[in-house]
Amino acid sequence: MCGLVGIYGVPEASKYIYFGLYSLQHRGQEGAGIACFDGKKIREYKNLGLVSEVFNEKILQELPGEIAIGHVRYSTTGSSTLQNVQPFCVTFARKTLALAHNGNLVNAHTLRCELEEEGHIFQTTMDSEVIMHLVVKYLREGLVTAISKAMQRIKGAYSVLLLCDNVLVAFRDPWGFRPLALGMINGGYALASETCAFDLLGVEYLRDVAPGEILVIDENGPKSYFPFEKEPQPLAHCIFEFIYFARPDSLIFQKNVYTVRKNLGFNLYKECPLSGAFIMPFPDSGTYAALGYAQASGLPLEFGVIRNHYIGRTFIQPSEKLRDLSVKMKLNPVKDFIRGKEVIVIDDSLVRGTTSKNRIKSIKLAGAKKIHFLISCPPLRYPCFFGIDFPQAKELIAAKHSVEEIRKFLDIDTLYYLSLEGLLDSVGDLRDKVCLACFTGNYPLEVDFSFRKDITEIK
């Protein structure tokens, strides 16, 4: 998760960043920050909380300039503390730098130990700081060379925005795990994790920052560098961007998320055609797959549970207690409508199982006659090391239990997961360019397990 926005060459850039971060709030709710170049130095402001809680008009007035980057945080590596909120800013060799990172490095522990042995002092527990230390280490050789050498050493998922005085740089890992888009606005340039931020700001989408690309934007406009070998790198776009993360009105990896999620529902019906009173999603995550299933089946789509939109996304709350409390507050069944009905419930994924169990329990208490539960992705059996918050196998219910055991645990009549082939069919020509490691255990690159206590659970 995490959301990035960058602006170059537009007056009051920080205000554009602010609205862009609003569009990406779903990608992180723990903290938000903006760093800008005011013509002489980089200024920053960041804090814990939602974008609307962190910033106000007075704060934005104190962030002047035409170049800025912003970040909304969702923690995977590094705890939820103010020091870990990004952008991360440093001063070195009379230059000020600010960095914002979406993704997760898989060799951060090894690199951090090496850098500490060399005398580097770390201020945070973020893997993102490792990137900054490596860039600074080579900075005297020039900015592009420094980033190139850093990219040769770091492994894993990274879409990064780096502000170095009056130069804005975007760079992305060669596997293309996390999205990053480039656009034009008012004669300047914009970068964002998702194109829904462009829609709000009036940005013309140009293209994605390519996997393995270093894109430098300065007074001469954008220029691209490719530090890796010219042989094509197998791509590994995160499939969960389509299943859950991204907003449905975004283009992700140049494909419309809304369409993909409807395709998931279509394929669910092909594989598991059921009859019932109606189709109902767990909103908002299951809504578009449920729409696809309803259109394919001819059954009505109804909203049997109502969402409180003032509660955050429960999946990205890092504390189990917070997660359970949010589940109870977030969805409420329409009891008179559900009572005595056979319902087909659709959701995007089943991770730990506790959230779904609580939701299904509320439907049973509302008097549902039968409950069929369909999931628009395959069983999640393996941990993710590239930026999703289910890093331990013991937290994944499908890693330890069969589908039938999970059905009994949920106490429902039917449980069905979309097949891997059904999932791949939904993304069309991206089928050979996505990371499926959380389903298959086949990781696209080697992971540094030297600091993991649960290694035996995933081997």
Image: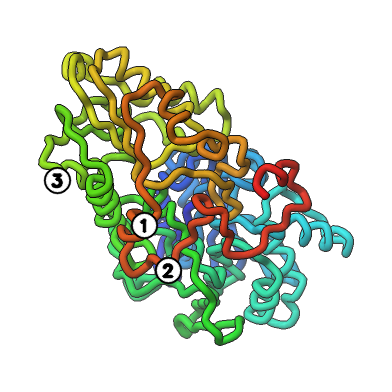
The residue depicted at 57 percent of the width and 53 percent of the height is 441
Of residues 412 and 263, the one nearer the viewer is: 412
The residue singled out by tag 2 in the image is 432
The residue singled out by tag 1 in the image is 421
Of residues 305 and 374, the one nearer the viewer is: 374
Above or below for 353 versus 452? above
The residue depicted at 45 percent of the width and 82 percent of the height is 221
Looking at numbered disc 2 in the image, what kind of residue is underneath it? Asp
Relative horizontal placement of residue 313, taking residue 273 as reference (left or right): right
The residue singled out by tag 3 in the image is 295
Relative horizontal placement of residue 371, taking residue 27 as reference (left or right): left
- Badge 2: residue crowd in 10 Å (few <14, some 14–19, many ≥20): some
Q: Position of residue 226 (x, y in %)?
A: 56, 82
Above or below for 431 versus 363? below
Q: Mark 1 and 2 residues: CB-CB less than 8 Å, in contact? A: no
Looking at numbered disc 1 in the image, what kind of residue is underneath it? Glu
Pair 1/2: label in front: 1
Q: Mark 1 and 3 residues: CB-CB less than 8 Å, in contact? A: no
Mark 3 falls on what kind of element? helix
Above or below for 385 versus 8? above
Q: Mark 2 and 3 residues: CB-CB less than 8 Å, in contact? A: no
Relative horizontal placement of residue 148, taking residue 47 as reference (left or right): right
Q: Position of residue 174 (x, y in %)?
A: 55, 72
